[in-house]
Amino acid sequence: MTFRLANLEGRAALVAADPDGVDRWYDLERVSDGRLPADPMAAIRQADELHVVTRGLDTASPDGRFDQALAAGSVGPPVPRPTNCFAVGLNYRTHAEEAGLDVPDTPLVFTKFPGCLAGPRDEVQLCADRVDYEVELVVVIGSGGRSIPAGRAWEHLIGLTVGQDVSDRTLQFAATPPHFDLGKSRDTYGPIGPVLVSTDSFRDPDDLALTCDINGERRQDDRTSNLVFGVPALVEYLSGILTLLPGDLIFTGTPAGVGVGRGVGRGQPLVAGDEIVSAVEGIGTLVNRCVSGPT
Ligand code: ZN
């Protein structure tokens, strides 16, 4: 049984469609009669139980409509406090080309510090004049572990979500060599959500459409089957170096179409008032409005 896990005001919740197709949310601790935890990070360690509880939602009473919770700003990042949050650069050939850089032979990995994570409708606080958008598929580690072979990678994941790897290009390239970590970790620069979707929900989890629209204009449009290093390869690579922990995130990289890449991006930097809409097939949509942040 597939499940969708969300974060409602800091509490874990399951999301399921009612017979009319309207998504409703169910507080996890309540609907499990206290067997499962309210903390989203603890809930991620109970994947088997999440499947079981979801099976019983048909007869449970919901807490509310999920679209209304989103509109009210009550939905936080489905994984609010991962131990590790990895991100991968130049992982689509088309994006490497627009940046004027070679496709790496080894995954180019950097950190998005977990403090940058934000909810699916949160505002992005622009703190500079060369801030960019990058829609990405985000992998959520389930059981995790060390030295996971690519062929078994999906078994060690709990699900997938949508991510925006908001990037301050000036800060990213302010040092030599560049410090990607800081430029991509300002407060609010990591919206994820709207839900964590269990891996068994996808017919082919290695081939999902992803798009990014700015103010209604399509800027990015690709499929995860075009990743240079796909999800299994990334899990094998990272787990060959360190233990992947439940709830760890991997931002898998962005396709072509970013605004102010190092080279000849065809878009424009984000400005206050812009609306970033990021979507991945089978998961959902992030809608993040840009506002002026502290400088
Ligand atoms: Zn990125």
Image (tube, grey):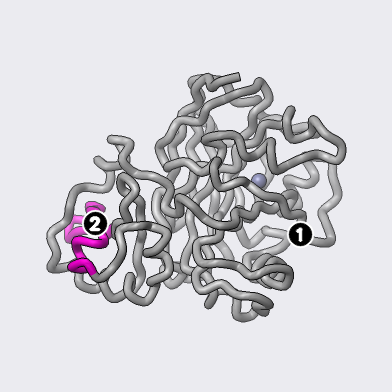
Query: Which mark is on residue 27?
Result: 2
Binning the other alpha carbons within 10 Å of mark 1 as few (below 14), some (14 to 19) or many (20 upward) gives many
Work out whether residue 155 can be spotted: yes
Residue found at x 14% / y 64%: 60
- Residue 88 magenta-highlighted: no
User: How many numbered discs?
Assistant: 2
Marks 1/2 in contact by CB < 8 Å: the verdict is: no
The answer to which of marks 1 and 2 sits earlier in the sequence is 2
Q: Where are the magenta residues, as a range? A: 15-34
Binning the other alpha carbons within 10 Å of mark 2 as few (below 14), some (14 to 19) or many (20 upward) gives many
Residue 34, image quadrant: bottom left
Residue found at x 21% / y 47%: 65
Q: Quadrant of the C terminus?
A: top right
Under mark 1, the amino acid is: Pro
Q: Position of residue 276 (x, y in %)?
A: 50, 33
Query: Which mark is on residue 107?
Result: 1
Instruction: Determine the secondary structure under disc 2.
Output: strand
Above or below for 184 versus 232: above
Task: Please name whichever residue, 170 or 221, is drawn nearer the observer in this view of the structure.
Answer: 170
Q: Position of residue 266 (x, y in %)?
A: 70, 31
Instruction: Determine the secondary structure under disc 1.
Output: loop
Q: Quadrant of the N terminus?
A: bottom left
Q: Position of residue 100 (x, y in %)?
A: 84, 40
Query: Which mark is on residue 201?
Result: none
